[in-house]
Image (tube, rainbow, N blue to C red):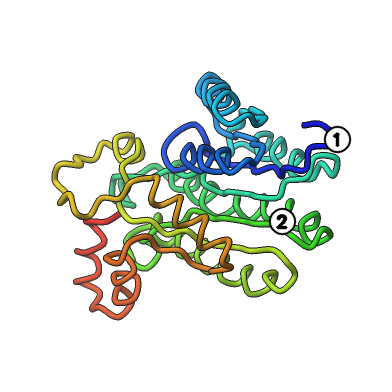
């Protein structure tokens, strides 16, 4: 980025695949320079080269394991670099666990909470002072429709991220920082394959594309909305889910996590 370049920079975690990669693509298409964060350096470099060639932007690669303190510190260092301000932060990195809580390793459960709660908290805390000083900034936290449905620690963590985003939107929106929790339902990405889930067992009409999730999430964030739930069917579920009997909610949640 040259001193004369007025384009802003977006940092995306979990940017090597799925929803994170789609955020990188759409933000790059809008003209933002990018900082791409994920564990897989090779995939990040391939993604960065493609986006730079396609959109004429600069895509910086920042390999980091966000379950590790050193990885988080590297990203915090980039977010707090006042010479290279970040205008858009997308907290997207995450993971899912397929087994029942009592069968999962406690290490996996704790790392899930770190990725879904602690890391967004730390990165938001790091980027906010610069945004508030400039009077502008955008923070997008990728939560889930599971935040509205009680089912295991994944839902609990996403519910925390949703509540955190709602509060931050209220607290900082009037100071120029727009904060949005994006809450997708089932989305065609590598997420479910990595969990070993059989996608064919779920009706086709429940599935969303990453393109739609990101497009609607970015638009809702620009409008200053605290929560973005793509598609009418999932908007309805977000409204009625908390009102349904517990047993029915649990059965519904099993289909849309």
Image position of 175 (left or right of 119):
right
Q: Quadrant of the C terminus?
A: bottom left
CB under 8 Å between callouts 2 and 1? no
Q: Quadrant of the N terminus?
A: top right
Quick check: can you spot residue 222?
yes
Q: Describe the element under mark 1 as helix, strand or loop.
A: loop
Query: Looking at the image, which is closer to me, 160 or 201?
Result: 201
In this rendering, the answer to whether 71 lies above or below 246 is above
In this rendering, the answer to whether 95 lies above or below 135 is above
The spot of residue 116 in percent (x, y) is: 51, 51
The spot of residue 237 in percent (x, y) is: 29, 69
Query: Looking at the image, which is closer to me, 241 or 232?
Result: 232
Image position of 99 (left or right of 138):
left
The spot of residue 255 in percent (x, y) is: 22, 56
- What's the CA distance linking mark 2 and mark 1? 27 Å
Q: Which residue is mark 2?
A: 125
At a point 51% along the width and 46% down the height, the residue shown is: 92
């Amino acid at each position: 980025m040259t001193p004369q370049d007025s384009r802003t920079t977006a940092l995306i975690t979990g940017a090597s695949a799925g929803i994170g990669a789609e955020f990188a693509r759409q933000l790059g298409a809008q003209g933002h320079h990018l900082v791409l964060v994920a564990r897989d350096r090779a995939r990040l470099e391939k993604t960065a080269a493609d986006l730079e060639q396609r959109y004429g932007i600069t895509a910086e690669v920042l390999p980091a394991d966000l379950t590790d303190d050193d990885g988080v510190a590297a990203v915090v260092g980039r977010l707090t670099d006042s010479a290279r301000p970040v205008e858009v932060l997308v907290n997207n990195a995450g993971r899912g666990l397929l087994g029942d809580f009592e069968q999962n390793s406690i290490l996996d459960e704790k790392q899930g909470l770190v990725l879904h709660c602690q890391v967004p908290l730390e990165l938001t805390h790091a980027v906010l002072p610069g945004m508030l000083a400039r009077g502008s900034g955008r923070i997008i936290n990728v939560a889930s429709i599971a935040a509205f449905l009680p089912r295991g620690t994944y839902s609990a963590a996403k519910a925390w991220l949703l509540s955190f985003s709602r509060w931050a939107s209220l607290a900082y929106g009037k100071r120029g920082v727009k904060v949005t929790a994006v809450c997708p339902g089932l989305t065609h990405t590598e997420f479910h394959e990595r969990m070993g889930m059989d996608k064919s067992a779920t009706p086709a009409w429940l599935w969303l594309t990453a393109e739609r999730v990101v497009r609607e999430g970015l638009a809702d964030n620009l409008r200053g909305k605290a929560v973005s739930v793509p598609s009418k069917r999932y908007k309805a579920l977000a409204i009625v889910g908390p009102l349904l009997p517990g047993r029915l909610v649990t059965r519904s949640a099993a289909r849309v996590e």
